Image (spheres, rainbow, N blue to C red):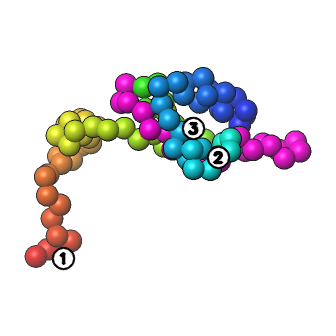
Amino acid sequence: MPERINMMIEGNLPGARDLVQDIRGTSRLVKEGRVAWLLPTVIRCDRDHALANKEFLFPFASVIECPQEESRARLARRSSAPLSPKTPNSSGK
């Protein structure tokens, strides 16, 4: 399973950047004997990139740039509660 997930990410990586792999300097796929696993991965990409909205069964996140007003509109469409420009003080003051 880890090998297939890694192949899927690598196949969609053109046009994106694996930030953690740049720092770590090694592959996200680790094999030790008959065991394989994936290391945490953070991808930076455009919001229309194939990896922008993917979810995998290991620590994976994609980071996109999005103007604040567009972010609010996108989140509001996905949320049942309206988003306010300011978060109220938790103490109620």
As measured in the structure, the alpha-carbon distance from the residue carrying label 1 to the one carrying label 3 is: 37 Å
Residue 43 is covered by the magenta coloring: yes
Circle 1 is placed at which residue position? 91
Task: Specify the farthest residue to the left.
Answer: 93
Residue 14 is covered by the magenta coloring: no
Circle 3 is placed at which residue position? 56
Q: Looking at the rendering, in which quadrant would you find the N terminus?
A: top right
Q: Residues within 10 Å of mark 2 (few under 14, many from 20)?
A: few
Q: Looking at the rendering, in which quadrant would you find the C terminus?
A: bottom left
Camera-near label (1 vs 2) is 2
Counting from the top left corner in percent of width and height, residue 39 is at: 65, 48
Counting from the top left corner in percent of width and height, residue 52 is at: 43, 32
As measured in the structure, the alpha-carbon distance from the residue carrying label 2 to the one carrying label 3 is: 21 Å
Q: Residues within 10 Å of mark 3 (few under 14, many from 20)?
A: few
Residue 41 seen by the camera: no
Q: Residue at x 16, y 70 (%)?
A: 89
Q: Residue at x 84, y 47 (%)?
A: 32
Give whichever of discs 1 and 2 has the lower sequence position.
2
Position of residue 85 in the picture relative to residue 53 (left or right): left
Camera-near label (1 vs 3) is 3
Give whichever of discs 2 and 3 has the lower sequence position.
2
- What are the residue bounds of the magenta stretch? 29-48
Circle 2 is placed at which residue position? 25
1 and 2 marks in contact (CB < 8 Å): no
Disc 2 element: loop
Counting from the top left corner in percent of width and height, residue 46 is at: 38, 30
User: Which amino acid type is shown beneath numbered disc 3?
Assistant: Phe
Counting from the top left corner in percent of width and height, residue 62 is at: 45, 39
User: Which amino acid type is shown beneath numbered disc 1?
Assistant: Ser
Q: Residue at x 41, y 41 (%)?
A: 63
As measured in the structure, the alpha-carbon distance from the residue carrying label 1 to the one carrying label 2 is: 45 Å
Asked whether 89 or 40 is in front, the reply is 40
